[in-house]
Every structure is written in C-alpha cells, then in structure tokens.
Image: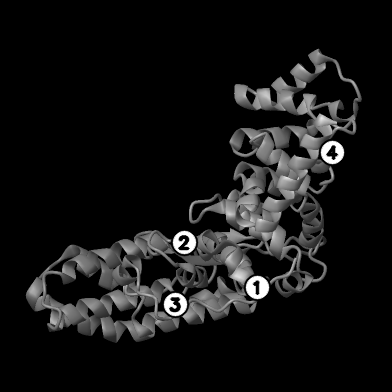
Amino acid sequence: MQIEYTPERNPILQPTPYELLNRLQVPTTQAAIQRGVKEWTSSPGTAMNKLYGNGMIQKLLGFRMQAIPVVDAAYKTLQPSIGELENLDRICENLKAAPPALNDEPTPEDHPYLRYTELTPRETDPEEPPEPIAQYTIKNEEVLVDIRYLTDLQKAFPPLSAQYGALGTLIDQLNAYRLLDPRIAMREEMYRTEGGRSAMDIGGMEMGRVGLTAILATITAIFGTISIVQFIRSGGKEISLAPLLWGFATWFVADPNLLNSFFDKSDPIKRDFEEIRGVTNNRTMQYLSEKHRIGGPSWARVVEGIYDSEHGNLHKEDNPAQTYKKRVAKDLAGNDAEVKAELLAMMETGDGKGTSDFAYFTKTLLDIRREDAKEFMSTYVRHDSFREGIRLDPTARRDIDDIQNARAMLRKA
C-alpha cells in the first residue's frame, strides 16, 4: 500500500465551541499542548514508566511554585467583588496543593484532580519480583468541570474588567495543570470538530502518513498504554473505535519503520501484529463480513467461541451433518437468532470450490495463535472494523466487488 504524506491541520480553521469554552486558543495553552505532544510522541514506548512516576511529581512541584503567586493575585482581585465563594476557594486551594510524595497515594480531599495507580514494569527480572511503578495522572473531567464553572462565573463581569481577567487567569492555571498530563495534551491536539471526534474519524483515507503516526499516538494518549490487551480493555469511551482499529491494524502494522519507531526490537507485541495483519488485510474476510453482516457484540462472541473450540472441527468436515451444523451455530450464536441464521447460511454457501464461507472464516481466524492477538480480533469484530475498512478504503471496495462478481459468475456456470 502506498502511503502519501499530507499536511498538518490548517491553522486558520475557526476554533470550535469546545476550544473556545476551554480556552484552547490561548497561546499559553497551545504551547502547553505542544509540550505535552512532544513529550509523549518522543518516546511513547517508555513514556508510561518515565512520565508518570517521579517525572509527574517533579512537574507538579514546578507547577505549584509558579501557581501560588499567580493564584493568590487573582483571588485578591476577585475577593472584594465575589466575597466568600466555596467553589472558588476550593479551586484556588486545589491549584496550590503540594503534590504527594513519590509512591504515596493522594487522597481525594487533598488532590481531587490526581489519579493514582500502580503499574507493572514492562521489563521484568524473573528472579526478582518487580517493584510497581507509581502512576500519577490527571482526572481531566474533574478539572474541566471547574473550568466550566469559572467560565460561567466570568459572564457576570464585563470582558475588559479586572475580575474577568482574574477568572481567565485561574482558567489558564487549571488548563496548565491538566496539560501536565501528556495524554490529555495529545487528546486536545487531536480534536478537530465539536464533540471531540478524532482525526481518524473524519479524515479516513485522507490522513496519510502524518495521520498514521498520530493513530498510535492517539491510542497511547487516550488509553494510556501501548499494550494491546490493556488498550482493548480500556473500552471505546473517547472516540469511535472502528476506524481507529482498522487503520491501526491495516496501515500501521503494514509499515515496519513506523512499527520500529514505537516498539522495542524484541517486543512480543510485534509477533501479535504479524498474526493480526494476515487476518485484517484479508479481502475475503472483508467480503464475508459484508455479505453476512459480521460485526457487533454477538459476532465478537462467535469469534471468542471459535478460539475456545466451541465450533468443534466443523471447519474441517467436507460434508457435515445438518444436526452438527445447527448445534455449532447455536453454541456460537447463543440467543441471537439473526447471528445463528447467518452462521447456518455461511455453512451452506461457499466459494464454489468446496470451501464453505464458515470454513474459510474459521480457518483464517485460527491462523492467529497468540492470546493477545486473539483478543484484539474479538474487539476488531465487535466494533465492525472489517466493514469499516471497506467504507474507508476505495481499493478495498473495488476488490470486494470483484470477489462478489466472480462468485456470481461461478454460480451461473
């Protein structure tokens, strides 16, 4: 596949309501976003271990040193006009709070914007149990709630007033705090339209290689990991996963240089990719997914059942009994009558050369043997990414049509 370079986002695009609400057009905020983006993309393979332990504590200490005089000055300007306001006092105290000591878990009362988790190091010594890594990340939504509170409070003052400017200063400080987390900085950089749709959502095939690099950076930014299993288990709360999964498996995995730039040479994730690529790039699998409407949670259950051998050896039988077909279809489909009917249809139709659609689908899935890669494929099907590839890739669309026409000719012969 030939991948073309495309230019970065046009800087003269009008800011979205989201950007205006959260002051993402302010030069200091934009600079903070770019610092976070650079920090994350410079070493995504090791960023989790380096950025969120003592690195985050040091950033919090530096933030506090500059925040205290700025926040105190803004509060002094606001206090005569506003008086005692519980939410305003709380926000100012949160911004000036001393960070916890390394490896100490922050309390919600003292650090409502901080999240603490313990990570297992990516590299371990089998003879010595690894020490967990203290991870400190920012609770983005908690900070955004307070940003929006101050934005509403600003409306009570004229735009050129000292009070309006002081509230803007506090908003800038809240943004500076949350953008200490490079995941959040990367996420903000990926916003393109109102509602937070990613570049992958709206760019599709037009993204080119620049966008390709952003795909994995987005995964790491949003899900906070480059582990396939942890990525999958994080769910799809932030963006539409279908185009992201398809682009990740089809484009990114197909380029060894991009792959090597994000993962260590010996990283086992590369072996997962080798197996994934053979299935996700398979045109017949895309054709079958369109023909039999393969995609969604029930079909993900089918994939998991195939990997768990709930299909028996049906894919190896030349002339299986009807009772055998019905039993396997019921085991795989569960209570989903539509999926059961499609499975039976797959068992009855084929390529005209003796291989049923079900046998081809099953044998291809079973080319994947590594557990992490199997779990990726289950998620790939759950989010209907085979058919998403047909929608986004004109070449795939033409190839699928050719397969359909060839089969039609075989049926007529």
- Mark with earlier residue (3, 4): 3
Q: Secondary structure at mark 4?
A: helix
Residue 408: name its quadrant.
top right
Q: Earlier in the sequence, mark 2 or mark 4?
A: 2
Which amino acid does the dot numbered 3 rest on?
Leu
Does 400 sit above or below residue 262? above
Query: Which residue bears the numbered disc 4?
Result: 363
Q: Nearer the viewer, residue 373 or 277?
A: 277
Which quadrant: the C terminus?
A: top right
Q: Sequence order check: which comes first, mark 3 or mark 2?
A: 3
Q: Nearer the viewer, residue 234 or 326?
A: 326
Of pointers 3 and 1, the one earlier in the residue sequence: 3
Q: Residue under circle 1?
A: 209
Q: CA distance from mark 4 to mark 1?
A: 32 Å
Residue wearing tag 3: 60
Q: Nearer the viewer, mark 3 or mark 4?
A: 4
Badge 3 crowding class, 10 Å Cα cut-off, few under 14, some 14 to 19, many 20 or more, is: many
Number of other residues with Cα within 10 Å of mark 2, as a class: few under 14, some 14 to 19, many 20 or more: some
